[in-house]
Image (spheres, rainbow, N blue to C red):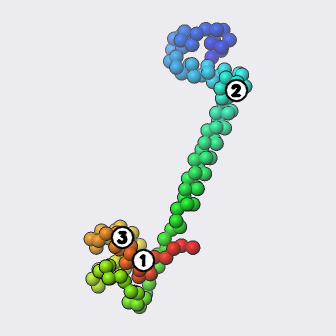
Amino acid sequence: MRLVLDEGKTVSRVAQDLDLTASALASWVKQARADRSNGKTGLTTEERAELAQLRRENRTLRLERDISKKPRCIQRVHPTPEETQIVQIPRRINFSPSDRLELWRRWKAGSSISDIARALRREPGTVHSFVSAAGGIARAL
């Protein structure tokens, strides 16, 4: 860079002499000019480092903000057999007694709604509605 900036040689000539690509040397020369002029001809190295740090912080804050906007996690509630007998399940959700036993067995074992639905050959929304109506899902506080 000194050869280009102080001695006035061309970037292409110095790059050829030092066996470098002209584009790499040109970007280094540009950065050196910015550093020498205290940022009047571009961002200094310190300013570039600060900008990169601020962009990382900004990305992290956006992720944290987006996560905080999402609803809280769903808690599993394991109703007793008496509670599941009392709950009025809407008629459109029709599970056989053996399907209900299998559903609750899998739910208590920690299976996801999707896995349970796949095992029972039902839509996940149907399984979710059943579990929710029976008191098996409660919002976390």
Q: In the figure, 89 relative to 124: above or below?
A: below
Q: Amino acid at mark 1?
A: Ser
From the image, tell me which residue sits under label 2.
39
Q: Quadrant of residue 41?
A: top right
> Left or right: 6 with respect to 138?
right
* Disc marking residue 125: 3
Total number of numbered discs in the rendering: 3
- Picture coordinates of residue 138, whole percent (x, y): 49, 76
What residue is drawn where x is 44% and y is 84%?
A: 79
Dot 2 and dot 3 residues touching (CB under 8 Å): no
Q: Amino acid at mark 2?
A: Gly
Residue 116 in sight from this viewpoint: no
Q: Give the secondary structure at mark 2.
A: loop
From the image, tell me which residue sits under label 1.
132
Q: Residues within 10 Å of mark 1 (few under 14, many from 20)?
A: some
Q: Residues within 10 Å of mark 2 (few under 14, many from 20)?
A: some
- Picture coordinates of residue 14, whole percent (x, y): 56, 11
Q: Quadrant of residue 119?
A: bottom left
